[in-house]
């Protein structure tokens, strides 16, 4: 495969995340990587701090919460080679500081099973918990933690009034991957608070990713 993975600036992800990825919003980004083919950007992969403090402390305990990072966006052009995604994710994770506890999700509401994470040997830890999220008319593009962090439902109602509504959060397949030395990975695995479960199977449903983002040219 004649492709390279390189760290990129956050602004280079904007068009891809807002217009090509199904979520249509930009998450917290601590590290961003691009998949390049002859200096043309063919995909982006981003990692950031999860919005949930429960998740940060829950995976391996509060002691290791600072090492938790979420693979929160992954998108490549439709004409990419068969193994481009697994090559991209594996290469990007190797470029992160170590040790790291990497968590990522496959959205059941989009009929995703997380086959890319299975191909990269992530650990499957089951479905995320059931939640009801506050939503605000006109702010659907934002994560609820952006406008509801630390606020009670009563405070949200007082602030947003009739614009506020509540929606069941789609449950997601949760995958975890450890990076570091063999000793560090063994230690993290021994502190994993989730049960390890068999990989889920089923038919994936592709979303419309036909949008052609602006191709950035980067000199190596």
Image (cartoon, rainbow, N blue to C red):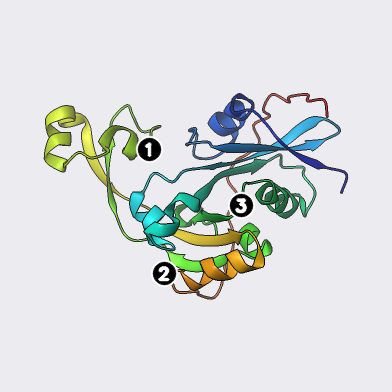
Residue at the spot x=36%, y=48% of the render? 52
Residue 170 position in % (x across, y down): 38, 53
Q: Mark 2 points at which residue?
A: 193
Q: First in sequence, mark 2 or 1: give its number.
A: 1
| Mark 1–mark 3 distance (CA, rounded to whole Å) | 28 Å
In the drawing, does residue 10 fall left or right of residue 215? left
Q: In which quarter of the image is the C terminus?
A: top right
Picture quarter containing residue 205? bottom right
**Front position in the image: 218 or 216:** 218
Local SS, label 2: loop
**Front position in the image: 11 or 40:** 11
In the drawing, does residue 121 fall left or right of residue 126? right
Q: Nearer the viewer, mark 3 or mark 2?
A: 3
| Mark 3–mark 2 distance (CA, rounded to whole Å) | 20 Å
**Front position in the image: 78 or 194:** 194
Q: First in sequence, mark 3 or 2: give its number.
A: 3
Local SS, label 3: loop
Q: Mark 3 points at which residue?
A: 98
- Circles 2, 1 touching at the beta carbon (< 8 Å): no
Instruction: Find residue 143 and name its label.
Output: 1
Position of residue 45 relative to residue 108, above or below, is above
Residue 189 position in % (x across, y down): 53, 70
Q: Which of marks 1 and 3 is in front?
A: 3
Residue at the spot x=52%, y=36% of the render? 29
Residue 178 position in % (x across, y down): 58, 61
Local SS, label 1: loop
Local crowd at mark 2 within 10 Å, few (<14), some, or many (≥20)?
Answer: some
In the drawing, does residue 29 fall left or right of residue 6? left
Q: Which of marks 2 and 1 is in front?
A: 2
Q: First in sequence, mark 1 or 3: give its number.
A: 3
């Amino acid at each position: 495969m004649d492709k390279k993975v390189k760290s990129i600036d956050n602004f280079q992800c904007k068009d891809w995340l807002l217009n090509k990825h199904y979520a249509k919003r930009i998450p917290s980004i601590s590290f961003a990587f691009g998949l390049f083919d002859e200096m043309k950007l063919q995909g982006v992969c981003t990692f950031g701090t999860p919005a949930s403090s429960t998740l940060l402390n829950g995976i391996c305990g509060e002691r290791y919460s600072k090492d938790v990072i979420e693979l929160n966006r992954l998108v490549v052009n439709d004409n990419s080679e068969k193994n481009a995604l697994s090559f991209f994710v594996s290469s990007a994770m190797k470029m992160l500081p170590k040790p790291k506890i990497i968590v990522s999700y496959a959205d059941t509401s989009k009929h995703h099973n997380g086959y890319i994470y299975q191909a990269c040997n992530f650990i499957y830890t089951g479905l995320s918990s059931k939640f009801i999220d506050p939503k605000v008319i006109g702010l659907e593009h934002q994560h609820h933690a952006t406008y509801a962090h630390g606020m009670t439902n009563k405070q949200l109602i007082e602030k947003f009034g009739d614009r506020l509504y509540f929606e069941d959060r789609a449950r997601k397949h949760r995958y975890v991957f450890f990076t570091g030395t063999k000793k560090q990975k063994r230690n993290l695995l021994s502190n994993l608070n989730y049960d390890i479960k068999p990989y889920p199977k089923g038919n994936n449903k592709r979303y419309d990713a036909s949008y052609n983002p602006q191709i950035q040219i980067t000199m190596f």
